[in-house]
Image (cartoon, grey):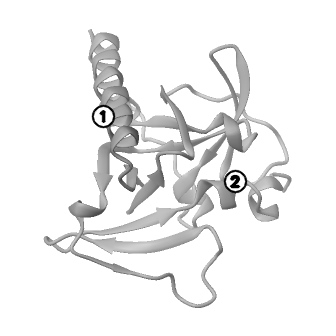
Amino acid sequence: MAREALREFQARLASRLQSAHATNVAAWLAVEAGSGRYLFPLGQAGEIFPWTAPTPVPYTQPWFLGVANLRGGLWGVAQLSAFLGEPPSRPPAGPMADAAREQARLVAFNDVLEVNCALVVDRLVGLRGVEAFATSQAPAEGAPPWLGATYRTAQGESWQELNLQVLAGQPEFLSIGA
């Protein structure tokens, strides 16, 4: 039943993605990871997978969780919130862990970026366009190059744009060895 709900959600999301591309509007995939809210440009985000526990790889950075078989391909799995500076986290044991895993997703980088990597996000929020935000602010001077503008909703929620294309080329992201 949960798989049917996931398939239905993915079908609706794919339909909205196609519609967003057709109207040529700036749009993002909105996700939550750790304590942050992030926007992935649609042209840079790839397929969304349900939580798949990666196989750990020794001697890697704490934010690199390991590798996973996603649709027959070997993909590196990075915990987005830990890469961005939050402490690496594992869901607690018991019912809370099941609920956290139920909402967690792996968002792959788009194939055109040529990086077999998926980011762990805690929750998909949906699609957002510029019309969803009241204000925006350029990244602070000295911010990492993959950080885009910060957008704020009329309700005061702050969303950080992440440029996955730039992130995919950064040595600190590509160097997973500890």
Q: Nearer the viewer, residue 109 or 105?
A: 109
Residue located at (30% from left, 43% from top): 126
Quote the CA–CA distance across marks 2 and 1: 35 Å
Instruction: Report the residue at 48% width, 52% height from top.
Output: 41
54, 143: nearer the viewer: 143
* Residue depicted at x 70% and y 28%: 55
Task: Name which quarter of the figure residue 36 lies in.
Answer: bottom left
Relative image position of residue 71 (x, y in whole percent): 62, 15
User: What is the x, y in percent for residue 176?
Assistant: 80, 52
Q: Can I make out residue 81 in this image? A: yes
First along the sequence among labels 2 and 1: 1
Give the amino acid at mark 1. Arg
Q: Say whether residue 103 is visible.
A: no
Rate crowding at label 1 as few (under 14), some (14 to 19) or many (20 or more) other CA atoms within 10 Å.
some
> x%, y% of residue 6?
33, 20
Circle 2 crowding by C-alpha within 10 Å: few under 14, some 14–19, many from 20: some
Residue 149 image position (x, y, % from top left)? 45, 74
Q: Which residue is mark 2?
A: 62
Query: Which element carries disc 2, helix, strand or loop?
Result: loop
**Is residue 24 positioned above or below 158 on the image?**
above
Q: Residue 175 lies in what quarter of the image?
A: bottom right
Q: Does residue 85 appear to the left or right of 4 in the view shown?
A: right
Quarter of the picture holding the N terminus: top left
Find numbered disc 1 in the image and state the secondary structure of the residue it sits on. helix
**What's the residue at 55%, 70% (across, down)?**
147
Amino acid type for the residue under numbered disc 2:
Pro
Q: Is residue 101 left or right of residue 171?
A: left
- Vertical relation: 163 (above or below) 42: below
Measured along the vertical axis of the image, is residue 144 above or below residue 146?
A: below
Residue hosting label 1: 16
